[in-house]
Amino acid sequence: MFSQISPYLDSKEAIVVTGMRRVGKTSLLRYIFEKIKSSNKLFLDLQNPLNQKYFDNDNYEMVKKNLAFLGVDFSKRAYLFLDEIQLVKTLPSVVKYLMDNYDIKFFLTGSVSFYLKNFFTESLTGRKYLFELYPLNFEEFLKFKGADIQIPKTSSDITQPMFDTVNVLFDEYVNYGGFPEVVLQSSADAKNKYLDDVFTSYFQLEVMRLRDFRKNTVIQELILLLMQRVGSNLDISKLASELGISRLTLMDYISFLEGSYFISLVKPFSGSRDIEIRKSPKIYICDTGILNHFAKIDDARLFENCVYNLLKTRGKKVNYYKRKSGVEIDFIYDEKTAIDVKLNAAQGDLNKLKRVSDELKLKEAFLVSRKYSTKDLVRYGFTL
């Protein structure tokens, strides 16, 4: 992500990095901090209550005085790095004031897009660049593992021995996910311990600290139920009844889980005249390691969730397609490409996918297979 941010290091706009807790936002921010050659810079972790107090004043000139005490020289350009900004509710107004009146370049991180978008919509309109950081994709995973492997871009160039070599690593990626700390562990026990820690950190520091959920057990149960429904359409009425809460309350909970990057809701593709199921989104979890560790779902849905996460990190729109007759396509990528996910690609699957994608006038169609295949129009998860 640094390569995406670096063109804007000298711009006036604030740099805001969001993403799930423990994906590496703080590491990225510290990396950028070291790259800034100026000595007029300051890094504050807002998880520290003392650092929060520096901004706790309605008189923003007093906030300026606090920052000056910490070494910021306001007579020239200064670089201010603030980590976990969602913990200080008044921060958007402070940032706006300091940007309006002084030459301050802000680098900000936060793990809840729901809050960041609401806080910063008005105060920093046109004054920020927003970047979203996700768990590692497979290419990044290989770098973290120190695996010097050049995977052919075209699946037809991948032989069975090549596939078998890469697939050992891809198995690990699917089963344990892409959280950096988890990837860096060498044993299964250590990986599982870190997955427990990642989820506990998310639940305690995001769910419980940022929202006043009156029934902790309900939100916990909801998370587990959503994991079991990965790749399925979300039936709000049925789920609300199962949890014993109102539809409105359930939708509020789901909105928070999506806004804090724990889940993703994939909406249906509506570019066809055919009658479709339009209202019900499909659900996916932020990381297959978390999903596999806590839900133990079947291999097909775990792999489908992995494929979704890999597509999402490419930054284009992802939908699904489904007719009332039952005909469906797992993913429509960028409104141009039909993608079906299979453990083992069969000719019938290819024929059906090609027929439906042609009817939808999509430019491209292919299967993503978990196992090795010699068929055309087949790719692998590690080539996405």
Image (cartoon, helix red, strand yellow):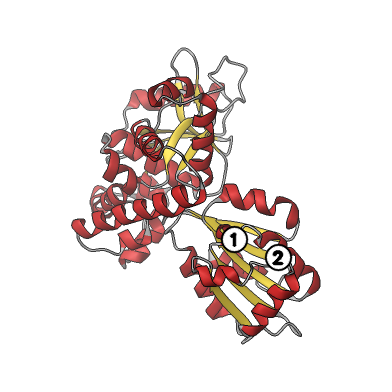
Q: Residue 221's spot in the image, x, y percent? A: 35, 35
* In this rendering, position of residue 208 left or right of residue 315: left
Amino acid identity at mark 2: Val
Residue at disc 1, secondary structure:
loop
Q: Residues within 10 Å of mark 2 (few under 14, many from 20)?
A: many
Q: Quick one: 29 or 161, which is closer to the camera? A: 29
Q: Quick one: 186 or 115, which is closer to the camera? A: 115
Q: Residue 232's spot in the image, x, y percent? A: 41, 27
The residue tagged 1 is: 88
Q: Residue 229's spot in the image, x, y percent? A: 37, 30
CB atoms at circles 2 and 1 under 8 Å apart? yes
Q: Quick one: 84 or 375, which is closer to the camera? A: 84
Amino acid identity at mark 1: Val
In the displayed structure, 317 sits above or below 357; it is below
Residue 122 appears anywhere in the view: yes
In the displayed structure, 18 sits above or below 331; it is below
* CA separation in Å, label 2 and label 1: 10 Å
Q: Quick one: 140 or 355, which is closer to the camera? A: 140
* In this rendering, position of residue 100 left or right of residue 239: right
The residue tagged 2 is: 94
Identify which residue is drawn at 66% across, 83% down: 72
Q: Which mark is residue 102?
A: none
Q: Earlier in the sequence, mark 2 or mark 1?
A: 1
Answer with the quarter of the image where residue 3 lies: bottom right
Q: Residue 203's spot in the image, x, y percent? A: 40, 49
